[in-house]
Image (cartoon, helix red, strand yellow):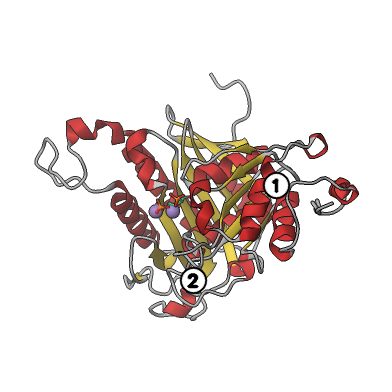
Amino acid sequence: MISKKVTTLEAFIVQQQKKFPTATGELSGLLRHIVLAAKIINREVNKAGLVDILGAAGTDNASGEAVMKLDVLADNELISALKISGDCCGIASEENDTFVVFDNEEAIDAKYIVCFDPLDGSSNIDVNTSIGTIFGIYRRISTSGKCTEADFLQSGRNLVAAGYVIYGSSTMLVYTTGEEVNGFTLDPSIGEFCLSHPNIKTPENGRIYSINESYQHRFSEEVNKYVAYCKVEDKATKRPYSARYIGSMVADFHRNLIKGGIFMYPAMTGYKNGKLRLLFECAPMAFIVEAAGGKATTGTKDVLDLQPTELHQRCPIFIGSPKMVEQVQFFLDNADVAPGSKTAAEQQLKSAPVMAIDG
Ligand code: AHG
Ligand code: MN
Ligand code: MN
């Protein structure tokens, strides 16, 4: 029996659309189709443990059908759902070298394009660790006909909506159109995403830092100083912080969004722009974090202000609780700061970035 009011994602999308009397319903239609693909991906992700019985990716399953890698399967599901939605004229995804034009009659003149990472953290699939899907929706720049590359090369400031699905201990969809960030948990028994985390605001400050520290020897001195700072004991600023790194951006980001923290994938030797992709990972997450009161920087500018020049462009990212992002920025901007010592300036934490100045 239902004992209290439940808002399904479906109902929520309708409510949101009603707030804009001029809305045509195309964005709602698009979101619905992303949700549909997410449910299918979720079903397949949940079966991943059965590969030994049903056949591993790249082999034939018991029925003699080829088993697809899950990231390819997720990519295909999103592409076909978006294509049939009729509300999207093309997509770009981490799994495809170039963008895909939808030139079927109902889609060719549609006004949105979608960029996505169909399966993020895919190295974690085989070990039952949280993975995700990330998406960003833009209004096309061209006016009609086949979409062009310029439709995809837009800065994150132009995002109309962005979100992610986390396939974790439960499956959640978190999305925003730039105002509130709302989270919906999938109730598998009824197959519905239900509003569980309304109006998410990320804590101003946090105690978690997430970075792959094994690359320390390849990071800049400034990044290493900030990481060292995270580990210094200091009651006033609740350090040392805790290190948490799953290796799925979606999962690391989601935890930090709720609990407060910072996720970093900086530039490093061999990856001069870091590893993560601007259009498929960084910009959508930056859009979400800003709407939740957080910040995201490349180290030199807000991630949302970075103008892409190619589809698979990468960028360094420092993203999370605003005070923590300000703090790492301070280290990035001040090469001569020592991480270890406490000073009066450090106690300015409440109103300004924490300053850890030698002395
Ligand atoms: P993907 O599975 O889509 O290729 O993304 C993996 C990304 C991201 O999710 C994660 O934060 C990062 O790669 C981990 O990289 P490292 O193993 O280099 O730390
Ligand atoms: Mn990814
Ligand atoms: Mn991926």
In this rendered view, identify the residue nearer to me: 124 or 244: 244
Q: Picture coordinates of residue 38 (x, y %)?
A: 41, 46
Q: Is residue 237 left or right of residue 254?
A: right
Extreme-front residue of the structure: 359
Q: Nearer the viewer, residue 355 or 45?
A: 355
Q: Can you say whether 178 is above or below 92 in the image?
A: above
**Secondary structure under the numbered disc 2 in the rendered image:** loop
Q: Residues within 10 Å of mark 1 (few under 14, many from 20)?
A: many
Outermost residue on the right side: it is: 344
Say which residue label 2 marks: 111
Q: Nearer the viewer, mark 1 or mark 2?
A: 1
| Residue 69, x across and y down, in percent | 26, 48
Residue 190, placed above or below residue 135: above
Residue 174 falls left or right of residue 89: right
Name the element at disc 1: helix
Q: Is residue 199 visible?
A: no
**Residue sitting at 57 percent across and 42 percent down?**
254
Residue 245 to residue 2: above or below: below
Residue 73 appears in view = yes
